[in-house]
Amino acid sequence: MHRKLALLLAHSTVAAVVTVGWIAPAAAYTGEELAKDAKVTLDQARRIALRAHAGKITDQELEKEPGGSGLRYSFDIRRGKITYEVGIDAATGQVLENKAEGPNPD
């Protein structure tokens, strides 16, 4: 009985670790250390960016950038064969940029 319980707990722990490991990378982004200064969360900024330009987010970062409050979320959103860069002000949620990336993306 103790052995079955130990195996069950071990399996549950491994499953939890695997699940957390799988979920965590999706939430990670460059500039995460700046999040303490943002009034808009990453999830809120993602929703705003996808409303501005529908597609699949392929890259995301929080960066200090001129314009707006000086702190912005930047998303690369792929739609078909074109990638768009959408910038969201991290203080106000305002869309600061929404354009197709050129041949030499940042």
Image (tube, rainbow, N blue to C red):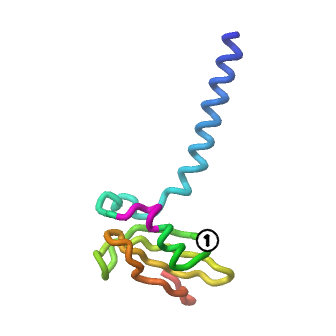
Kindly report the secondary structure that dominates the magenta region of the rendered protein: helix
List x then y, in percent, for residue 22: 61, 49
Left or right of residue 99, residue 54 in this image: right
- Residue drawn where x is 61% and y is 77% of the image: 78
List x then y, in percent, for residue 73: 41, 71
> Per the image, is 92 magenta?
no
Say above or below: 66 vs 56: below
* Amino acid identity at mark 1: Lys
- Residue drawn where x is 63% and y is 34% of the image: 14
Q: Quadrant of the N terminus?
A: top right
- Residue drawn where x is 47% and y is 61% of the image: 43
Q: Which residue is mark 1?
A: 56
List x then y, in percent, for residue 103: 57, 89
> Which quadrant holds residue 91?
bottom left
Left or right of residue 33, residue 49 in this image: right
Boundaries of the magenta span:
40-45
